[in-house]
Amino acid sequence: EPEVTQTPSHQVTQMGQEVILRCVPISNHLYFYWYRQILGQKVEFLVSFYNNEISEKSEIFDDQFSVERPDGSNFTLKIRSTKLEDSAMYFCASSPTGDNSPLHFGNGTRLTVT
Amino acid sequence: AQSVTQLGSHVSVSEGALVLLRCNYSSSVPPYLFWYVQYPNQGLQLLLKYTSAATLVKGINGFEAEFKKSETSFHLTKPSAHMSDAAEYFCAVSPGGGAQKLVFGQGTRLTINP
């Protein structure tokens, strides 16, 4: 069964450094998402992406964050200048359509900012 | 605005016993409701979803949930727990339409005692 893959599984970076988290969504899906979960807190929506542009973003997704679909298969999340509070598990997801179609999540990338 | 409250961050049941995980939601529009499960070191996997059709929804692995509008609840049940059900369970709500901006509950960790 097709699945969403995320790399790396664990990323350690120093405060102020740029980091890029990578995702390969399921190939025929049209909607792509990033969610994050800070340790001990809820899973939070960051951004959705459709038709090569951001369709919705949360208040968390400020100017330090950006997303890109550089080719036909990858979907990336970039954090320009990481802060300690960016430490979290970041989940990529995709869905075939919007509305009520279920999201397929990757296994996540654990980002640790030191 | 939408929100989800899961009662009980940790639930422990004996193998073969009834599993009941509670979820209450708040939504200003007719909601779509979901239960996701997360096994250790894996991503979130859809268990079941409610999308305004039948109020009793059956999912994978013998789980089901009932949408009760009067109680704003969407509790997850399974008649007989199995050791493999041990995982973290997340209830989520979405307003639907276009990209899915899921709002998650804080999660309930289910432990199964032999």
Image (tube, coloured by chain):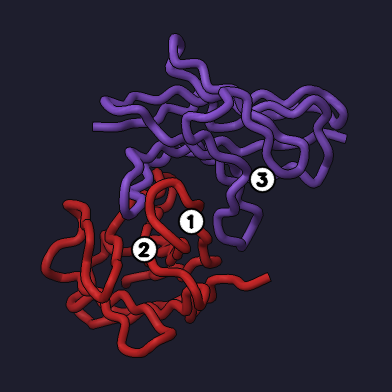
Q: Which residue is mark 3?
A: B87
Q: Which mark is residue A103?
A: 1
Q: Is residue B76 above or below residue A112?
A: above
Q: Report the amino acid beneath label 1.
A: Leu
Q: Report the amino acid beneath label 3.
A: Ala
Percent x, y for residue B29?
Answer: 29, 28
Q: Which mark is residue B48?
A: none
Quadrant in the picture for the N terminus of chain A: bottom right
> The chain shown in purple is which?
B
Nearest-to-viewer mark from 3 and 1: 1
Which element type, helix, strand or loop, lies under badge 1?
A: loop
**Residues at circles 1 and 2 in contact by the CB criterion of under 8 Å:** yes
Q: Colour of chain A?
A: red
Residue at image position (37%, 58%) is A35
Chain letter belonging to callout 1: A
**Residues at circles 3 and 2 in contact by the CB criterion of under 8 Å:** no
Residue at image position (52%, 67%) is A106
| Res B105 quadrant in image | top left
Q: Are marks 1 and 2 on the same chain?
A: yes
Q: Are marks 3 and 1 on the same chain?
A: no
> How many other residues sit within 10 Å of disc 3, few (<14), some (14-19) or many (≥20)?
some
Give the residue at the far front of this rendering: B53
Disc nearer the start of the sequence (1/2): 2
Q: Is residue B3 above or below residue A60?
A: above
Instruction: In this rendered view, identify the residue nearer to me: B41 or B100.
Output: B100
Q: Which residue is mark 2?
A: A33
Instruction: In this rendered view, identify the residue nearer to me: A30 or A73.
Output: A30
Residue at image position (37%, 46%) is B102
Residue at image position (21%, 57%) is A57
Instruction: In this rendered view, identify the residue nearer to me: A49 or A44.
Output: A49
